[in-house]
Image: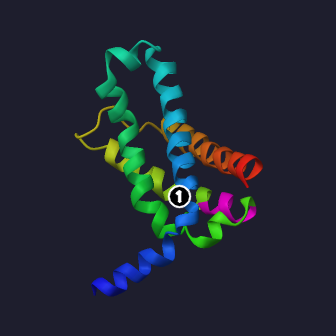
Amino acid sequence: MAHSEESFLTRRIDAGAYPLAVGDILGISAVLTIGVIFHNGIEYLSTAPIGWGLTILPFLIGWVVISPLIGAYSAGAAESAKAAIPLAIRAWIPASIVGLGLRATPLFDGGVGITFVAVVLITGAIAVTATRWLFFLIIR
């Protein structure tokens, strides 16, 4: 059984896609941080770093769990923006749902109002699209 799990992850994560992972995490974190600043002011980042982190954490957990399953870091993802961007968007939708689900639990504060759901889905998709587009524009 362990061998089949290793094979699955080996097919889903390619070392050439690691820079995409860094960009995705930075992009998702940046968009969520902008939201934190919008709602709480910039001083919140230094006065309540745990609150800031707990706002971002559920979505990063969702991303780390879901993105490899969707193939966001497969060999094909690192080949072109045409392949990488749709994979990221397809991964972001269920990853954000995982993040929203976590946020709906007592472990994370903030709730999941319908407006927040829409904003997270749209801005997160824009973030992963932008970071991957920039990666292929600048790096590749």
Q: Is residue 133 left or right of residue 51?
A: right
Please state which of residues 16 and 131 is positioned toward the viewer in this rendering: 16
Choose top left, top right, bottom left or bottom right for residue 56. top left
Question: What's the residue at 37%, 16% (across, down)?
Answer: 46
Question: What's the residue at 28%, 37% (across, down)?
Answer: 108
**Residue 4 coordinates in the image, percent (x, y):** 36, 86
Q: Is residue 81 left or right of residue 119?
A: right
Circle 1 residue: 18
Q: Is residue 94 above or below residue 112?
A: below
Q: Is residue 79 left or right of residue 21?
A: right
Is the N terminus in the top left, top right, bottom left or bottom right quadrant? bottom left
Q: What's the amino acid at mark 1?
A: Tyr
Question: What's the residue at 49%, 69% (across, down)?
Answer: 13
**Residue 73 coordinates in the image, percent (x, y):** 54, 64
**Residue 126 coordinates in the image, percent (x, y):** 65, 43
Q: Report the magenta residues as a range.
A: 82-87
